[in-house]
Image (spheres, rainbow, N blue to C red):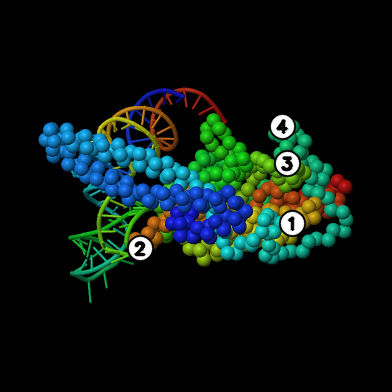
Amino acid sequence: MLDLKFVRENPDAVRAGALKKRLPDRAAAVDKALALDTELRAMMPKLDGMRSDLKNSGKEMGKLTPEQREAFLGKQKEKKAEMQALEEREKQLRAELEQQLGLIPNVPDGDVPDGKDDSENVEVRRIGTVREFGFAPRAHYDIGEAQGWLDFTKASAMAGSRNYILFGDLALLHDAVLRYAVDLLVARGFTPIDPPLLVRDAAMFGTGFFPGGEEQTYRCEKDGLNLIGTSEVPVTSLHGGEMMAEADLPKKYVARSACFRREAGTYGKDTRGLYRVHQFQKVEQVIVDVADKARSIQHHHEIVKNAEDMLQAFDLPYRVVAVCGGDLGVPQAMKYDIETWMPSRNGYGETHSASRFYDYQARRLDLRYRQKDGGKAMYCHTLNNTVAASPRILIPLLENHQQQDGTVSVPKALQAYLGGRAVLGKPVF
RNA sequence: GGAGAGGUGGCAGAGUGGCCGAUUGCGCCGCCUUGCUAAGGCGGUGUACCAGAAAUGGUACCGGGGGUUCGAAUCCCCCCCUCUCCGCCA
């Protein structure tokens, strides 16, 4: 949610922002919102005056004699009837205004590249060297199935397509990565959280997933609850409705949770393997801090670095891209993706997504703090980034570290999480 | 699932139809006093919106929505949440 005053004063920038995100419908919401705002503001002085009059004269009632009261009452009723029509219109306008305002996307920051979709994201840096295999490298699903680590057939039989079952060492590796990610962030001062997986609509709206993301979301209609697609939703909502003290900020959280995505509209895309699945585990970092743009940008770099450090510890080549306008979501002001090298795709595949929002989510969540020394109440700034999403991260781990015989070497950093083992699996090829 | 109690400003906690945007305490801010890592005195201290250059004025908001009334934090209805007891259960 943007500040109405900001929209009013910068309509061109807000409209242009929506268009940069390739969201013409949302750009139209700017003009709709402003038209409603104009009408509302035109009528408010009159309505306020009528209310004031009615209120003041109502107070006189108590002092009148019964006869006087009779005549007075008639006049009051007349005034009220006249006012009611205006009030009806006001209520309608406010509801529509709120709806349109909720549709207006966050304005992409100056450092967001222009572009229509992910093909036009801009590479910022490329780290690590892509390994030269002395043999034909296999895809993770071939290795996994040969090792007895992966079963897609039984998974889809019991749960439908885009499901998987991990067995044995791969299940352990999955857990090792996630645990490593949590430990890394805890060591850096983040507070670990195990959040709710089912949340109310308010949390989905507050983080900006609704309206718009309903088709991506599994919903328990009976209870009016939604399965989260990322723990960003419950964790960012954690302090919603609160008035925090500036001294309590920043809040830094790391949450591990299951995530659920319907993946509607992706038929035929990434159908093989562990890349695009309905359910996965994710370790997510979330920062809530004061309303300071420079500080937000600094945090943004910090959370990207946290993820990069993990990938480097795993000896995985990756690149960081600045996400272009057309690939940016509604609530984000700027986003970096990290893409890790995946031999089976012969390319980099998205494994991380780091967003900064400024106060867009905070406004929707009523997430505020009071400035120190008796200052003003301000909306917070929020940010988040993946630390590790698994099983997707298992793709580069298996594929980059595979041996010719189908065994997989374990990066040093993860060995302690696997009972000290340096190799997983047995020769199968 | 059944029964009851309750949701008020940063927090605690009064307030059962007009004198309530709301007593009071804590916290916070300012000034004063005091010679010491403290205490005391006085004053101030919600948010949003509208009008205004500003001073200021106005309106709305006491969990959310609707209703009764000239007038609602206060009465009625629906919903949400919290707590206690009972039942069920991991």
Q: Which mark is residue A373?
A: 2
- Amino acid at the residue labelled 1: Tyr
Q: Are marks 4 and 2 on the same chain?
A: yes
CA distance for labels 1 and 3 = 21 Å
Tell me the quarter of the picture where residue A257 sits.
top right
Chain of the residue that carries numbered disc 3 in the rendered image: A
Q: Are marks 3 and 2 on the same chain?
A: yes
Q: Are marks 4 and 1 on the same chain?
A: yes
Q: Which mark is residue A348?
A: 1
CA distance for labels 4 and 2 = 59 Å
Closer to us: A394 or A261: A261
Q: Are marks 1 and 2 on the same chain?
A: yes
Residue A284 seen from this side: no
- Amino acid at the residue labelled 2: Asp
Q: Which mark is residue A267?
A: 3
Mark 1 neighbour density, 10 Å: few (under 14) some (14–19) many (20 or more)? some
Helix, strand or loop at disc 1? strand
Does the CB distance between marks 3 and 2 fall below 8 Å? no
**Which badge, 3 or 4, is on the more N-terminal residue?**
4
Q: Residue at x 61, y 61 (%)?
A: A112
CA distance for labels 1 and 2 = 49 Å
CA distance for labels 3 and 4 = 19 Å
Q: Nearer the viewer, mark 1 or mark 2?
A: 1
Q: Are marks 3 and 4 on the same chain?
A: yes
CA distance for labels 3 and 2 = 55 Å
Q: Residue at x 46, y 47 (%)?
A: A97
Q: Nearer the viewer, mark 3 or mark 2?
A: 3
**Which badge, 4 or 2, is on the more N-terminal residue?**
4
